[in-house]
Image: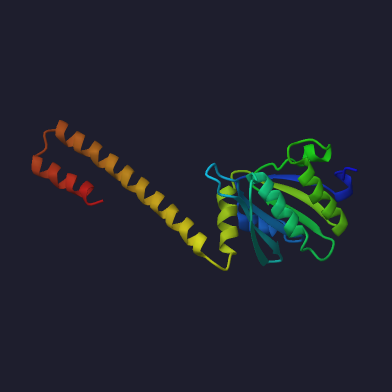
Amino acid sequence: MLVTEREIGYDLEIQENTTVEELRKQYWEGIIIWLNASGTSPDGKPGSYRCVMDFHGNVKYMEKELAGATANQAMIQGAIDAVDCIQKPMRVFLCAPGALGFESAFRGKGVNSDLLQELFKLLLKKGCQVTEVRFMGGADLIRKFVLSCNPDHTKLDELNKKEQQGRDYYRMKIYGECIDKVVDILKKNHIDDSVIQEIMQIKNNL
């Protein structure tokens, strides 16, 4: 028998142009489960989830590899494992960067309906109600927050390093393009070559 929206008090909220901290304040009265996952890669690397249970500022980090899972399947499994840890009835806010297929699953439809119904039955057993929070455009913010809750900061350090390299690359690219335009203007105005060479040296030193 399918679990219905009414049985688990299902609600949907779409969040955009906000931050993790703002959402933590907004959903303070319940437990927030932040969901981040990756799917199985073509080279055989298993899918996995990393999620955080967040209750009144107290966080619990969880992760697991899941062979053959898609990113959505991994996030749903993360939600199942997190809800299984809940000890008393409360409102659960499942925060993911997009739709997980809840509406279809309530009707027994969708590729992940069986897995979602497993989640719904667990919520029902725990006496919990659920709000699906779709944090649109928030994938990177969720990932960074989740990794910051991992006692092992290796992955977070790698992410920060990669982001810094990206910023450095685009900074040099933009500066370089600006210098090229300045040089073109100077040449058109027949400015002394020694001045142009000095400006070109700035680009070489970026």
Residue 160 in the image: x percent, y percent? Answer: 46, 57
Q: Name the residue located 87 percent from the left edge and 57 percent from the top edge.
A: 125
Residue 163 in the image: x percent, y percent? Answer: 44, 53
Q: In the rendered view, would you say 122 is above or below 187?
A: below
Question: Could you tell me how many numbered marks the image carries?
Answer: 0
Q: Is residue 68 visible?
A: yes
Q: Is residue 79 left or right of residue 20?
A: right
Q: Is residue 127 visible?
A: no
Quarter of the rendering containing residue 143: bottom right
Residue 178 in the image: x percent, y percent? Answer: 28, 40
| Quadrant including the N terminus | top right
Query: Which residue is at the front of the view, 69 or 185?
Result: 69
Quarter of the rendering containing residue 200: top left
Q: Is residue 110 left or right of residue 49?
A: right
Q: How was the colour assigned to the protein in this rendering?
A: rainbow
Q: Residue furthest top?
A: 188
Quarter of the rendering containing residue 93: bottom right
Q: Name the residue located 9 percent from the left edge and 40 percent from the top edge.
A: 193
Q: In the rendered view, would you say 103 is above or below 54?
A: above
Residue 139 in the image: x percent, y percent? Answer: 58, 48
Q: Name the residue located 21 percent from the left edge and 48 percent from the top edge.
A: 204
Q: Is residue 24 left or right of residue 7?
A: left
Query: Which residue is at the front of the view, 107 or 142?
Result: 107
